[in-house]
Amino acid sequence: MAVEEIVLLNADDEAVGTAPKAASHHRDTPYHLAFSCYVVDTEGRVLITRRALSKRTFPGVWTGSCCGHPGPGEGLRGAVLRRLRDELGISGVSLTSVLPAFQYRAVAEDGTLENERCPVVRADVPAGTPVARNPDEVEDAEWWTWRQCLDLAARPEASPWYRLQLAELAPLGAPRDWPDAGTATLPPALTW
Protein backbone atom coordinates (compact mmCIF):
# COMPACT_ATOMS: atom_id res chain seq x y z
CA MET A 1 0.00 0.00 0.00
CA ALA A 2 1.38 3.42 -1.00
CA VAL A 3 1.91 6.10 1.62
CA GLU A 4 -0.89 8.68 1.40
CA GLU A 5 0.49 12.18 0.95
CA ILE A 6 -1.03 15.58 1.67
CA VAL A 7 -0.43 18.84 -0.17
CA LEU A 8 1.27 21.46 2.00
CA LEU A 9 0.21 25.10 1.53
CA ASN A 10 1.69 28.52 2.22
CA ALA A 11 -0.31 31.48 3.59
CA ASP A 12 -1.48 32.29 0.03
CA ASP A 13 -2.89 28.74 -0.36
CA GLU A 14 -0.23 27.85 -2.91
CA ALA A 15 1.24 24.34 -2.94
CA VAL A 16 4.71 24.32 -1.40
CA GLY A 17 5.33 20.59 -1.16
CA THR A 18 3.94 17.29 0.01
CA ALA A 19 4.28 15.17 3.13
CA PRO A 20 3.08 11.78 4.40
CA LYS A 21 -0.42 12.23 5.84
CA ALA A 22 -0.01 10.10 8.97
CA ALA A 23 3.34 11.60 9.98
CA SER A 24 2.13 15.17 9.35
CA HIS A 25 -0.76 15.23 11.82
CA HIS A 26 0.63 16.13 15.26
CA ARG A 27 0.77 19.07 17.69
CA ASP A 28 2.27 21.31 15.01
CA THR A 29 0.49 20.08 11.88
CA PRO A 30 1.50 22.13 8.84
CA TYR A 31 -1.20 24.02 6.92
CA HIS A 32 -2.45 21.70 4.19
CA LEU A 33 -5.21 20.91 1.72
CA ALA A 34 -8.32 18.91 2.67
CA PHE A 35 -12.05 18.82 1.86
CA SER A 36 -15.42 18.03 3.44
CA CYS A 37 -18.45 16.61 1.65
CA TYR A 38 -22.14 16.50 2.57
CA VAL A 39 -24.19 13.85 0.74
CA VAL A 40 -27.76 15.08 0.28
CA ASP A 41 -30.59 12.93 -1.08
CA THR A 42 -33.59 14.01 -3.16
CA GLU A 43 -35.72 14.14 0.01
CA GLY A 44 -33.33 16.72 1.52
CA ARG A 45 -31.80 14.35 4.07
CA VAL A 46 -28.08 14.55 4.83
CA LEU A 47 -25.82 11.55 5.38
CA ILE A 48 -24.13 12.19 8.74
CA THR A 49 -21.29 9.94 9.84
CA ARG A 50 -19.45 9.09 13.01
CA ARG A 51 -15.72 8.66 12.59
CA ALA A 52 -14.36 5.22 13.36
CA LEU A 53 -13.30 4.70 16.97
CA SER A 54 -9.92 3.49 15.69
CA LYS A 55 -9.10 6.82 13.98
CA ARG A 56 -6.01 8.46 15.46
CA THR A 57 -7.47 11.97 15.29
CA PHE A 58 -10.96 12.88 16.49
CA PRO A 59 -12.16 9.26 16.88
CA GLY A 60 -15.91 8.77 17.32
CA VAL A 61 -16.99 12.34 16.55
CA TRP A 62 -20.08 12.98 14.42
CA THR A 63 -19.49 14.98 11.27
CA GLY A 64 -20.56 15.45 7.66
CA SER A 65 -20.66 12.61 5.15
CA CYS A 66 -16.96 12.30 4.42
CA CYS A 67 -13.73 14.23 4.42
CA GLY A 68 -10.26 13.67 3.13
CA HIS A 69 -7.15 15.08 1.53
CA PRO A 70 -6.60 15.59 -2.21
CA GLY A 71 -3.35 13.93 -3.17
CA PRO A 72 -0.58 15.65 -5.11
CA GLY A 73 -1.93 16.53 -8.57
CA GLU A 74 -5.46 15.31 -7.71
CA GLY A 75 -8.38 17.65 -8.34
CA LEU A 76 -11.10 18.29 -5.76
CA ARG A 77 -13.75 16.41 -7.75
CA GLY A 78 -11.54 13.33 -8.05
CA ALA A 79 -10.61 13.38 -4.36
CA VAL A 80 -14.25 13.66 -3.24
CA LEU A 81 -15.37 10.86 -5.57
CA ARG A 82 -12.51 8.64 -4.35
CA ARG A 83 -13.35 9.14 -0.65
CA LEU A 84 -17.11 8.72 -1.17
CA ARG A 85 -16.40 5.38 -2.85
CA ASP A 86 -13.75 4.27 -0.32
CA GLU A 87 -15.51 5.40 2.88
CA LEU A 88 -19.19 4.92 2.01
CA GLY A 89 -19.44 2.85 -1.18
CA ILE A 90 -21.25 5.72 -2.92
CA SER A 91 -20.78 6.55 -6.59
CA GLY A 92 -22.73 8.25 -9.36
CA VAL A 93 -23.10 11.58 -7.56
CA SER A 94 -23.47 15.13 -8.80
CA LEU A 95 -21.06 17.53 -7.02
CA THR A 96 -21.50 21.22 -6.18
CA SER A 97 -18.88 23.55 -4.71
CA VAL A 98 -20.55 25.17 -1.66
CA LEU A 99 -17.85 26.74 0.56
CA PRO A 100 -14.69 26.78 -1.59
CA ALA A 101 -12.82 29.16 0.73
CA PHE A 102 -13.48 27.35 4.05
CA GLN A 103 -10.45 26.85 6.32
CA TYR A 104 -10.06 26.04 9.99
CA ARG A 105 -7.78 25.09 12.87
CA ALA A 106 -8.86 22.70 15.64
CA VAL A 107 -7.07 20.85 18.43
CA ALA A 108 -8.02 17.28 19.40
CA GLU A 109 -8.07 16.02 23.01
CA ASP A 110 -4.64 14.47 22.49
CA GLY A 111 -3.22 17.81 21.30
CA THR A 112 -3.19 16.96 17.59
CA LEU A 113 -3.78 20.07 15.50
CA GLU A 114 -5.93 20.12 12.37
CA ASN A 115 -4.81 23.02 10.19
CA GLU A 116 -6.60 22.86 6.86
CA ARG A 117 -7.86 24.73 3.84
CA CYS A 118 -10.96 22.61 3.50
CA PRO A 119 -13.37 23.40 0.63
CA VAL A 120 -16.89 22.08 1.29
CA VAL A 121 -18.77 20.18 -1.41
CA ARG A 122 -22.34 18.87 -1.68
CA ALA A 123 -22.92 15.49 -3.35
CA ASP A 124 -26.47 14.94 -4.61
CA VAL A 125 -27.86 11.39 -4.70
CA PRO A 126 -31.29 9.81 -5.18
CA ALA A 127 -33.28 8.88 -2.06
CA GLY A 128 -32.60 5.28 -1.13
CA THR A 129 -28.97 5.36 -2.23
CA PRO A 130 -27.30 2.45 -0.45
CA VAL A 131 -24.40 3.12 1.91
CA ALA A 132 -21.63 0.56 2.46
CA ARG A 133 -19.50 2.10 5.20
CA ASN A 134 -15.84 1.20 5.52
CA PRO A 135 -15.47 0.32 9.24
CA ASP A 136 -11.85 1.52 9.24
CA GLU A 137 -13.16 5.01 8.45
CA VAL A 138 -16.81 5.18 9.55
CA GLU A 139 -18.35 3.86 12.77
CA ASP A 140 -21.95 4.87 11.90
CA ALA A 141 -23.72 6.47 8.94
CA GLU A 142 -27.28 7.76 9.19
CA TRP A 143 -29.62 9.86 7.05
CA TRP A 144 -30.68 12.91 9.08
CA THR A 145 -33.10 15.77 8.53
CA TRP A 146 -31.64 19.25 8.23
CA ARG A 147 -33.11 20.11 11.64
CA GLN A 148 -31.18 17.20 13.19
CA CYS A 149 -28.01 18.42 11.47
CA LEU A 150 -28.48 21.91 12.87
CA ASP A 151 -29.07 20.48 16.35
CA LEU A 152 -25.87 18.41 16.15
CA ALA A 153 -23.82 21.57 15.60
CA ALA A 154 -24.60 22.62 19.18
CA ARG A 155 -23.53 19.31 20.73
CA PRO A 156 -20.02 18.42 21.95
CA GLU A 157 -19.95 15.11 20.05
CA ALA A 158 -19.86 17.04 16.74
CA SER A 159 -16.47 17.54 15.13
CA PRO A 160 -15.03 21.06 15.39
CA TRP A 161 -14.98 21.45 11.61
CA TYR A 162 -18.65 20.38 11.41
CA ARG A 163 -19.65 23.07 13.91
CA LEU A 164 -17.68 25.73 12.02
CA GLN A 165 -19.05 24.61 8.64
CA LEU A 166 -22.64 24.57 9.90
CA ALA A 167 -22.22 28.17 11.09
CA GLU A 168 -21.60 29.07 7.42
CA LEU A 169 -24.02 26.58 5.86
CA ALA A 170 -27.08 27.32 8.05
CA PRO A 171 -27.63 30.83 6.60
CA LEU A 172 -27.68 29.30 3.09
CA GLY A 173 -30.92 27.42 3.85
CA ALA A 174 -31.73 23.76 3.39
CA PRO A 175 -28.95 21.66 1.82
CA ARG A 176 -30.72 21.18 -1.52
CA ASP A 177 -30.93 25.00 -1.75
CA TRP A 178 -27.24 25.67 -1.11
CA PRO A 179 -26.06 27.76 -4.05
CA ASP A 180 -23.21 26.73 -6.28
CA ALA A 181 -20.37 28.97 -5.09
CA GLY A 182 -18.29 28.12 -8.13
CA THR A 183 -14.63 27.31 -8.10
CA ALA A 184 -13.06 30.77 -8.44
CA THR A 185 -12.10 30.89 -4.76
CA LEU A 186 -10.63 27.41 -4.56
CA PRO A 187 -7.02 27.58 -3.42
CA PRO A 188 -4.50 27.99 -6.25
CA ALA A 189 -3.14 24.55 -5.35
CA LEU A 190 -6.44 22.83 -6.23
CA THR A 191 -8.34 22.33 -9.46
CA TRP A 192 -11.98 21.34 -9.63
Image (tube, rainbow, N blue to C red):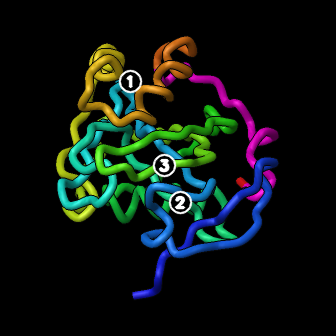
**Whole-percent x and y of residue 177?**
54, 19
Give the mark, 2 or 1, whose residue is nearer the N terminus. 1
Asked whether residue 99 is drawn in magenta, I would say no
Asked whether residue 179 is drawn in magenta, I would say yes
Q: Answer above or below: position of 171 versus 67.
A: above
Residue beneath the point at 56% across and 38% down: 104
**Residue bearing the label numbered 2:** 69
In the rendered structure, the answer to whether residue 71 lies left or right of residue 161 reads right
Q: Nearer the viewer, mark 2 or mark 3?
A: 3
**Whole-percent x and y of residue 144?**
26, 27
Give residue 137's quadrant in the image. bottom left
Residue beneath the point at 81% across and 53% down: 188
Q: Main secondary structure of the magenta part?
A: loop
**Whole-percent x and y of residue 105?**
53, 40
Q: Which mark is residue 114?
A: 3
Secondary structure type for disc 2: loop
The three-letter amino acid code for the residue at tag 2 is His
Q: Answer above or below: position of 102 versus 86.
A: above
- Which span is picked out in magenta? 175-191
Give the mark, 2 or 3, whose residue is nearer the N terminus. 2
Count residues near mark 1 (Cα–Cα under 10 Å), then give few for <14, some for 14-19, many for 20+.
many
**Residue bearing the label numbered 1:** 44
In the rendered structure, the answer to whether residue 118 lies left or right of residue 11 reads left
Q: Nearer the viewer, mark 2 or mark 1?
A: 2
Count residues near mark 3 (Cα–Cα under 10 Å), then give few for <14, some for 14-19, many for 20+.
many
**Whole-percent x and y of residue 160?**
40, 34
Count residues near mark 2 (Cα–Cα under 10 Å), then give few for <14, some for 14-19, many for 20+.
many
Give the mark, 1 or 3, whose residue is nearer the N terminus. 1
Secondary structure type for disc 1: loop
In the rendered structure, the answer to whether residue 40 lies left or right of residue 133 reads right
Judging depth in this view, the residue of 68 and 58 nearest the camera is: 58
Residue beneath the point at 18% across and 46% down: 140
